[in-house]
Image: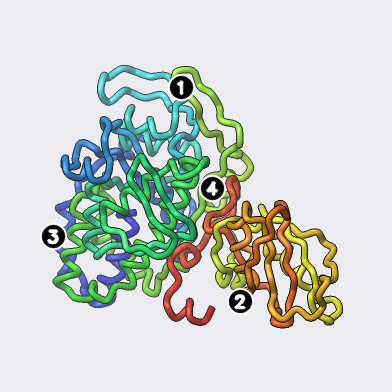
């Protein structure tokens, strides 16, 4: 996340702040050599690939931070987050792929950086590569798993992450459901929130909100990354050279990166990325199989879906977008319950022939499960479209109502899991909706402007 922020800062620098402000900042970056003595690497493709590593740096936090943001426990000296970032050759698109930290991985032969012991290839969870061999072994392991050649490596810990968020004045995120995690202390009501550094760390670390654990956490990390990029690229205060330098110092001051990823390099990339917006970025996670793989001495590991993973990394190597994005999806209302999980029976409450079948088809097109057979309502003079629902399915009812703006919600105890929509004279069309997070196991990518808070003018038009 910090690396993408650095690229965003470089974009602003190229618009007028220039090399003078960037001078001297390079000395603050700690250098590592993740490519030392590496052999038999994947063939380079078009574009630029950066491995972003977020480490479990609990040993750098203060006691006050430890208590406030529930960062107890001992540091594992492993990677808490791994993302592979691809910048297209024409600098018009950034693709970000999250690599589940508990992914099943086969560690290449290596020398333990602590004990000096020689290790043969052995199975591990992906985040253990850093603990055994630092950045070098992490890069080797990821390259072996993805067959994508990594050009740059960037690393950030808890403290530097919080400092970055505070330096830009916080980051706004939106959620359609309450997010509460007793482990991290996160507690957000539905709606928009501006998070400071500590709150942002709680948001991106929480994985006890539902049954999906680390998978939904990666989706929140991607959402936050898009919001952070939007904050940096869209904040007018950064056009002030003095303020810009303060933010740049915070962003770059505690990075660990390879020697080739200099501030001059970032500035050159920034010049080529003028006009870059959240819509220029796309985000996805490597899909995993439903059944975890038990490894003796390690525990449950996540196994990638081979076919889907191959498609994702093949797109990076060939410099292709991860997914097509149409205008209908970007206009869809974000809802709590995925429409794919909801069954609807449409009833035509008007004299207009064929209106029920029209609404049924439109609901199926936006993802809802329907009966496929619309029926006539008892009252053919209904004025206002009504969604009837069993109170046990109230969240699903709100999702259906989002597809019928202005519809009335009416409880019908004992109705069961199928929701009824009675079309009224006010009905004109079904509004598209989509879940806040893609369904578990989905391979599609989300664009940056699809996971950030809507701008006020866009919300007004909706």
- Snapshot colouring: rainbow
Q: Would you place residue 358 above or below residue 120 in this image?
A: below
Between residue 124 and residue 24, name the one nearer to us: 124
User: In the rendered image, which residue does mark 2 sit on?
Assistant: 406
Mark 1 neighbour density, 10 Å: few (under 14) some (14–19) many (20 or more): few
Between residue 25 and residue 373, name the one nearer to us: 373
Q: Residue 99: image x %, image y %?
A: 46, 43
Residue 89 appears in the figure: no
How far apart, in angstroms, are the residues tagged by discs 2 and 4?
43 Å
How far apart, in angstroms, are the residues tagged by discs 3 and 2?
57 Å
Residue 446 appears in the figure: yes
State the count of labels: 4
How far apart, in angstroms, are the residues tagged by discs 3 and 4?
36 Å
Marks 2 and 4, the one that precedes in the sequence: 4
Quarter of the image for residue 62 reads top left
**Does dot 3 land on a helix, a strand or a loop?**
loop
Marks 3 and 2, the one that precedes in the sequence: 3
């Amino acid at each position: 996340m910090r690396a993408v922020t650095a690229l965003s800062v470089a974009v602003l620098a190229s618009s007028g702040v220039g090399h003078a402000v960037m001078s001297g900042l390079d000395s603050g970056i700690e250098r590592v050599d993740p490519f030392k003595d590496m052999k038999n690497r994947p063939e380079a493709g078009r574009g630029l690939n950066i491995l972003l590593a977020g480490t479990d740096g609990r040993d750098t936090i203060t006691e006050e931070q430890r208590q406030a943001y529930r960062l107890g426990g001992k540091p594992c000296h492993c990677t808490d987050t791994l993302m592979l970032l691809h910048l297209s050759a024409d600098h018009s698109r950034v693709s970000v792929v999250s690599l589940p930290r508990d992914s099943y991985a086969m560690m290449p032969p290596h020398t333990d950086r602590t004990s000096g012991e020689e290790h043969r290839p052995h199975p591990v969870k992906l985040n253990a590569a850093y603990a055994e061999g630092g950045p070098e072994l992490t890069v080797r392991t990821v390259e072996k798993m993805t067959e994508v050649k990594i050009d740059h490596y960037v690393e950030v810990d808890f403290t530097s992450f919080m400092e970055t968020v505070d330096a830009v004045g916080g980051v706004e995120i939106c959620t359609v459901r309450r997010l509460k995690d007793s482990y991290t202390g996160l507690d957000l009501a539905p709606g928009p929130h501006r998070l400071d550094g500590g709150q942002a760390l709680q948001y991106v670390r929480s994985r006890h909100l539902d049954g999906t654990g680390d998978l939904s956490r990666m989706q929140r990390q991607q959402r936050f990354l898009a919001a952070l990029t939007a904050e940096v690229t869209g904040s007018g205060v950064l056009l002030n050279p003095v303020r810009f330098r303060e933010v740049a110092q915070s962003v770059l001051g505690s990075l660990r990166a390879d020697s080739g990823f200099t501030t001059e390099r970032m500035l050159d990339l920034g010049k080529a990325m003028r006009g870059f917006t959240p819509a220029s970025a796309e985000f996805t996670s490597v899909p995993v199989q439903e059944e975890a793989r038990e490894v003796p001495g390690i525990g449950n590991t996540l196994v990638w879906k081979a076919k889907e993973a191959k498609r994702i990394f093949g797109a990076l190597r060939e410099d292709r977008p991860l997914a097509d994005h149409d205008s209908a999806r970007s206009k869809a209302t974000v809802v709590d319950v995925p429409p794919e999980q909801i069954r609807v029976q449409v009833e035509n409450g008007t004299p207009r022939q064929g209106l029920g079948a029209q609404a049924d088809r439109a609901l199926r097109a936006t993802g809802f499960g329907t009966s496929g057979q619309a029926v006539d309502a008892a009252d053919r003079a209904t004025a206002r479209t009504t969604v009837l629902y069993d109170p046990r399915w109230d969240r699903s009812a709100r999702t259906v109502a989002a597809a019928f703006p202005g519809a009335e919600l009416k409880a019908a105890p004992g109705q069961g899991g199928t929701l009824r929509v009675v079309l009224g004279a006010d009905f004109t069309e079904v509004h598209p909706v989509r879940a806040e997070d893609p369904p578990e196991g989905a391979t599609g990518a989300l664009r940056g402007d699809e996971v950030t808070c809507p701008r006020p003018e866009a919300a007004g038009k909706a």
